[in-house]
């Protein structure tokens, strides 16, 4: 089970979390995943020998279709 707290104190109307509660949580940073690497690994796992080139093409295709 996990509990996640988003800390955005710069927004209006929000206050800092008290220090006694801050020590109970570990900081975690979030980042945008590299979809090309994810697609490459999935294609290699399925047996595609040209997974590196196909993953780049797939990523471009999905990016274009989402715009």
Image: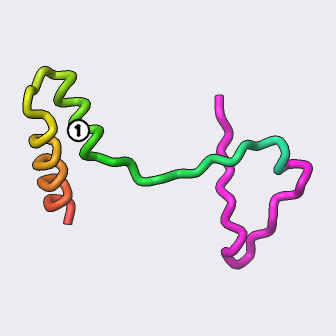
Residue 37: image location, x then y, percent: 28, 41
Q: Residue at x 23, y 30 (%)?
A: 42
Q: Which residue is mark 1?
A: 39
Residue 1: image location, x then y, percent: 65, 28
Residue 40: image location, x then y, percent: 21, 36
Q: Is residue 18 above or below residue 10?
A: above
Place residue 44 in its image quadrant: top left
Question: If the image is split into quadrants, where does the C terminus sit?
Answer: bottom left
Front-lying residue, 46 or 51 = 51
What is the residue that sits farthest to the right in this orientation?
Answer: 20
Residue 56: image location, x then y, percent: 15, 48
Task: Tell me where the magenta segment starts and ends, as one range.
Answer: 1-21
Front-lying residue, 5 or 25 = 25
Place residue 18 in its image quadrant: bottom right
Q: Residue at x 8, y 27 (%)?
A: 49
What is the residue that sits farthest to the bottom in this orientation?
Answer: 12
Q: Secondary structure at mark 1?
A: helix
Question: What secondary structure predominates along the stretch shown in magenta?
Answer: loop
Q: Residue at x 33, y 48 (%)?
A: 34
Label count reads 1
Q: Is residue 65 above or below residue 25?
A: below
Q: Is residue 52 above or below residue 21?
A: above
Residue 11 is left or right of residue 43, and the answer is: right
Asked whether 52 falls inside the magenta stretch, the response is no
Residue 60 is left or right of residue 31, and the answer is: left
* Disc 1 crowd, CA 10 A, few/some/many (<14, 14-19, 20+): some
Looking at the image, what colour scheme do you see? rainbow
Q: Residue at x 70, y 78 (%)?
A: 12
């Amino acid at each position: 089970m996990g509990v996640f707290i988003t800390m955005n104190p710069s927004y209006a109307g929000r206050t800092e979390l008290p220090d006694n509660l801050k020590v109970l949580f570990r900081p975690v940073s979030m980042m945008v995943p590299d979809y090309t690497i994810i697609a490459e690994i999935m294609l290699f796992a399925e047996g595609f020998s040209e997974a590196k080139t196909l993953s780049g093409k797939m990523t471009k295709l999905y990016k274009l279709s989402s715009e």
